[in-house]
Image (cartoon, rainbow, N blue to C red):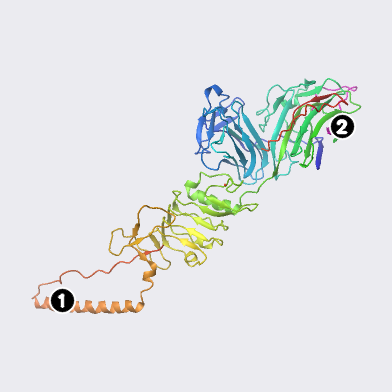
C-alpha cells in the first residue's frame, strides 16, 4: 500500500485567485437572475436546444434553481459543453431534483459522464436533491458534462450545472491524469452550509454539528489567515471546530472502503490563545499506526494535512483518528475536512485528428451541431452517426449520415484519415465532390448517391479500384475530363431511366436525360470523321441548288421547305460516481481510550 502524508507548515504567501470560469446553469429555465448567495444563474437555452423543459410539482418546490429541469428522451447521451482553459483545474457540480415532475412517482437512474469518462450512476430521489462534484484538470479547450440513458423508459434529466475554476496550485497531490469525486466536505462546529461568496471557489461545506461526546467550539480570533494554505479553506470554515471534553479522548474520523483510492485533507486552527501552561498536541493515526509528527494548530493561522492512499487491494478497511500526545494538556480538535475518491486514469478522449474533422463537419453542416461531448467515449455512448475503433484514443472509422437532411457543400474533414466508410446518401449536399475524399488512405466505401453534387468526379476516386463508389442520383455530375452541361428537364426520346441507389427508397423511378458515360466513350473516331465529311457534302450541294433556284426565279427568294435536322443531344449520367460508502463503523469503539466520532469519511 502506497501511503502519502505531508504536513504543510505554511510559510509562503498567496492571494486568493478569482475564478476564470464561474458558470451556473439553471437547466430548463429561460431567465437569468442572481440568487441569495450572489451567484448569477442563466437558463440553458444557449447551451441546449434539445430535450424537454419540465417543472417540478408545486407541492415539491424546493428553490428557484431546482424548480425546473431538462429531460432527454432521445440519443444515447446528451451533453453540455463550455469553453475552458486547457490545463486549468475545474470543479463541476451537477444537481438532480426529480420533484415528481412527470407525476409518475418514479425517479430514474442513469449515467453521468465528463469529457469521455464515466463519472457515476445517478440515483435520483422522489423528495431529495442529489448532487455530485468532480475536480479535474481540463485536457482540451472545452469541457463537457453528459447524461446517458441506461435503462428503458428511464429518461435522464438534470436540474443544475455549475463550473468553477480552481487555483492550479490546489489539490496538487493528486496526479493531473486523475479526477477527484467529492465524498464529503464538512465545516465542523458550523450550523449552516458555507459557500460563495465566503468561499471564492464556491465549494459547499456542509455543517458538522458535534455529537457522540464531541463539543462545538468557536475561535476568539478576529481574523484568521487562510490564503496561505495551499487549498485555501474559507475563513468562516476555520472559525469553528469540534473537540472533546477530555484531554485523553481522541476523535475518530471514520473509515474508508478498501476498494477505492482516497484523498483526505484536514484543516486545523487553534480557537483560543494558549498560555504557557497549555498545550494542544495530537497525531493522525491510520488504524493503530501514527502517520504524522505532532500537530499543534496555530492561532489565527491554518495548518493543513493531507492523506492519500493509492491502494485498492487491501482486504480490510482502514480507520482514521486524531489522538493526543502524552504531553498534551488539551484534547485534539479539527475545523474542517474534505474527502475525495480518486478516479481511474482519465482518457485522453477521441483522437484529436478526428475531433478536428468532426468539428469541421459540424461547422459546415448545422444539422450536426446538436451533438457534443466526446464523440467516441465512453463506450458504448458514441455519437449515433459515427463508428469508432477500440484504441485508447479511439479513431472514427465510419460516418453514417444517410437521410440526415444535410445541405450545402461538403466541408473539409480530411484529418479523419482512419475513415473506412462514408455514407451520406439521400441528402441535399451540393457543389463539387471534394478532392480530399480520394486521399483518405483507409477509405473502402463512399456512398454519395441521391444528392445535388455537380462537376467532375475526382480522378483519385474514379481511378481507385479498392474503393466502392456510389454516386447515382446526382444529375449534375460529369465524368472527369468531360465538360458539364445543364440538365434539360424537358423529356425527349433520348432520356434513359436510372435505377435509384440501394440506399434510398423513392417509391418511383427517377429519369435523367443523360446517357451513361460509357456510351460516348465507345464511338470510334473514324465514324465521326465520315459523319463530318458527309454532312459538309450535303450542305454544299443544297447551297448550290438554292443559288440556281434563286437565279431562275427572277430575283424572287425561295427557301427549301422544312428545317435542317437537329443533332440528338447526349448527356452523361454516372451512377455510442464511484459511489462507495465510506462510513463510520458503529462497532469500532476502542476500549483503550475514549473515542468520539467526528464524521463519516
Instruction: Work out whether residue 533 or residue 342 is closer to the camera in this orientation and state it.
Output: 342
Is 274 one of the magenta-colored residues? yes
Which quadrant: the C terminus? top right
Residue 396: horizontal and vertical position, in percent?
57, 53
Q: Earlier in the sequence, mark 1 or mark 2?
A: 2
Total labels: the figure holds: 2
Mark 2 lies on a secondary structure that is loop
Whether residue 467 is situated above or below residue 66 in the rendered picture: below
Quadrant of the rendered structure where residue 326 is?
Answer: top right
Mark 1 lies on a secondary structure that is helix
Residue 391: horizontal and vertical position, in percent?
64, 53
Q: Which mark is residue 546?
A: 1
Whether residue 201 is situated above or below residue 549 in the rendered picture: above
Range shown magenta? 269-288
Is 217 one of the magenta-colored residues? no
Instruction: Work out whether residue 381 or residue 354 is closer to the camera in this orientation and state it.
Output: 381
Residue 307: horizontal and vertical position, in percent?
79, 37
Which residue is outermost to the front? 152
Residue 229 visible in rendering: no
Quadrant of the rendered structure where residue 225 is?
Answer: top right
Instruction: Determine contact: label 1, label 2, CB under 8 Å.
Output: no
Which residue position is annotated with label 2?
294
Rendered residue at 57%/28% (across/down): 66
Residue 342 visible in rendering: yes
Whether residue 224 is situated above or below residue 119 in the rendered picture: above
Q: Main secondary structure of the magenta part?
A: loop
Residue 107: horizontal and vertical position, in percent?
57, 31
Which residue is outermost to the left? 554
Q: Going by the image, does 512 lie left or right of 87?
A: left
Mark 1 burial class by Cα count in 10 Å: few <14, some 14-19, many 20+: some
User: Mark 1 or 2, which is nearer the eye?
Assistant: 2
Q: CA distance from mark 1 to mark 2?
A: 125 Å
Amino acid at each position: 500500500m502506497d501511503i502519502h502524508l505531508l504536513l504543510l507548515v505554511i510559510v509562503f504567501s498567496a492571494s486568493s485567485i478569482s475564478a476564470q470560469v464561474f458558470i451556473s446553469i439553471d437547466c430548463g429555465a429561460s431567465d437569468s437572475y442572481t440568487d441569495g448567495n450572489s451567484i448569477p444563474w442563466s437558463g440553458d437555452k444557449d447551451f441546449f436546444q434539445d430535450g424537454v423543459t419540465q417543472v417540478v410539482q408545486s407541492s415539491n418546490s424546493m428553490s428557484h434553481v431546482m424548480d425546473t429541469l431538462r429531460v432527454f428522451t432521445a440519443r444515447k447521451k446528451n451533453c453540455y459543453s463550455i469553453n475552458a482553459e486547457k490545463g486549468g483545474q475545474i470543479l463541476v457540480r451537477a444537481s438532480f431534483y426529480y420533484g415528481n415532475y412527470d407525476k409518475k412517482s418514479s425517479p430514474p437512474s442513469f449515467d453521468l459522464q465528463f469529457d469521455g469518462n464515466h463519472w457515476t450512476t445517478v440515483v435520483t430521489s422522489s423528495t431529495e436533491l442529489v448532487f455530485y462534484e468532480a475536480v479535474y484538470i481540463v485536457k482540451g479547450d472545452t469541457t463537457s458534462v453528459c447524461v446517458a440513458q441506461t435503462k428503458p423508459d428511464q429518461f435522464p434529466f438534470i436540474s443544475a450545472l455549475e463550473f468553477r475554476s480552481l487555483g492550479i496550485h490546489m489539490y496538487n497531490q493528486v496526479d493531473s491524469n486523475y479526477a477527484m469525486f467529492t465524498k464529503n466536505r464538512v465545516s465542523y462546529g458550523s450550523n449552516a452550509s458555507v459557500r460563495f461568496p465566503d468561499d471564492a471557489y464556491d465549494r459547499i461545506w456542509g455543517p458538522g454539528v458535534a455529537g457522540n461526546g464531541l463539543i462545538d467550539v468557536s475561535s476568539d480570533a478576529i481574523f484568521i489567515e487562510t490564503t496561505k494554505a495551499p487549498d485555501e479553506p474559507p475563513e468562516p470554515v476555520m472559525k469553528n471546530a469540534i473537540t472533546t471534553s477530555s484531554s485523553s479522548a481522541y476523535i475518530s474520523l471514520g473509515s474508508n472502503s478498501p476498494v477505492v483510492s482516497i484523498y483526505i485533507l484536514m484543516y486545523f486552527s487553534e480557537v483560543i490563545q494558549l498560555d504557557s501552561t497549555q498545550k494542544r498536541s495530537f497525531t493522525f493515526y491510520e488504524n493503530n499506526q501514527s502517520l504524522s509528527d505532532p500537530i499543534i494548530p496555530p492561532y489565527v493561522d491554518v495548518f493543513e494535512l493531507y492523506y492519500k492512499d493509492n491502494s485498492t487491494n487491501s482486504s480490510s478497511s482502514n480507520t482514521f483518528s486524531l489522538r493526543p500526545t502524552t504531553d498534551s494538556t488539551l484534547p485534539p480538535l479539527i475545523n474542517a475536512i474534505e474527502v475525495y475518491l480518486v478516479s481511474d486514469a482519465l482518457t485522453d478522449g477521441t483522437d484529436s485528428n478526428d475531433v478536428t474533422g468532426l468539428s469541421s463537419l459540424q461547422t459546415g453542416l448545422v444539422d450536426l451541431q446538436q451533438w457534443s461531448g466526446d464523440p467516441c467515449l465512453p463506450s458504448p455512448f458514441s455519437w449515433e452517426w459515427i463508428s469508432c475503433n477500440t484504441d485508447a484514443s479511439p479513431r472514427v472509422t465510419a460516418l453514417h449520415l444517410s437521410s440526415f437532411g444535410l445541405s450545402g457543400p461538403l466541408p473539409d474533414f480530411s484529418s479523419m484519415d482512419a475513415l473506412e466508410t462514408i455514407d451520406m446518401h439521400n441528402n441535399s449536399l451540393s457543389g463539387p465532390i471534394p478532392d480530399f475524399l480520394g486521399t483518405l488512405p483507409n477509405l473502402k466505401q463512399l456512398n454519395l448517391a441521391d444528392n445535388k453534387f455537380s462537376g467532375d468526379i475526382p480522378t483519385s476516386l474514379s481511378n481507385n479500384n479498392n474503393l466502392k463508389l456510389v454516386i447515382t442520383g446526382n444529375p449534375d455530375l460529369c465524368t472527369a475530363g468531360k465538360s458539364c452541361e445543364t440538365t434539360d428537364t424537358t423529356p425527349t426520346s433520348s432520356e434513359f431511366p436510372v435505377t435509384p441507389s440501394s440506399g434510398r427508397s423513392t417509391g418511383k423511378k427517377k429519369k435523367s436525360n443523360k446517357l451513361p458515360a460509357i456510351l460516348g466513350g465507345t464511338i470510334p473516331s473514324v465514324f465521326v470523321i465520315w459523319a463530318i465529311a458527309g454532312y459538309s457534302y450535303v450542305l454544299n450541294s443544297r447551297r448550290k441548288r438554292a443559288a440556281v433556284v434563286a437565279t431562275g426565279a427572277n430575283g424572287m427568294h425561295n427557301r427549301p421547305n422544312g428545317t435542317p435536322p437537329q443533332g440528338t443531344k447526349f448527356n452523361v449520367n454516372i451512377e455510442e460516481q464511484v459511489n462507495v460508502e465510506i462510513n463510520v463503523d458503529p462497532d469500532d469503539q476502542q476500549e483503550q481510550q475514549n473515542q468520539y466520532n467526528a464524521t463519516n469519511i
